[in-house]
Image (cartoon, rainbow, N blue to C red):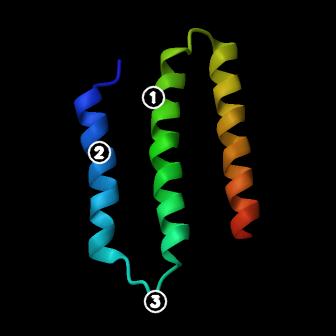
Amino acid sequence: NVDARVTSLSIIGMAMWTAWWFKPNQDQKLEFVANEIAENALASLRRAKSVQRIESISDLTAEIRENLALIDGIASRNKV
């Protein structure tokens, strides 16, 4: 199970810490960073939910394939 308090505080902390490192004139645009933070928060919630539904090897391999597809998508957007 996922602890709602820890999850909530983690997401809030992730968003709040941005104030220490984000430099509007030096880094990415504010909208880009805000979208990335939101996507990261959603991804962590999706991951926690998906872990709860893994009950077999085939579930696990499906999870791995989904994660690899996400990595491929990110890599292609960032041209890694």
Residue lying at 64% horizontally and 14% vertically, measured from the top left: 57
The amino acid sitting under disc 3 is: Gln
Quarter the C terminus occupies: bottom right
Q: CA distance from mark 2 to mark 1?
A: 13 Å
- Specify whether 16 is left or right of 58: left
Residue 19 appears in which quarter of the rendering?
bottom left
Residue lying at 29% horizontally and 45% vertically, measured from the top left: 10
Read off the residue under disc 1.
Answer: 48
Q: Nearer the viewer, residue 67 or 4?
A: 4
Q: Position of residue 20 (x, y in %)?
A: 26, 74
Q: Residue furthest bottom?
A: 25
- Specify whether 46 is left or right of 10: right
CA neighbours of label 3 inside 10 A, class few (<14), some (14 to 19), many (20+) = few
The amino acid sitting under disc 1 is: Ala
Quarter the N terminus occupies: top left
Q: Position of residue 17 (x, y in %)?
A: 28, 64
Nearest to N terminus: mark 2 or mark 1: 2
The secondary element bearing badge 3 is classed as loop
Read off the residue under disc 3.
Answer: 26
Q: Residue furthest top?
A: 55
Residue 42 can be seen in this image: yes
The secondary element bearing badge 2 is classed as helix
Q: CA distance from mark 2 to mark 3?
A: 26 Å
Read off the residue under disc 2.
Answer: 10
Residue lying at 53% horizontally and 50% vertically, measured from the top left: 39
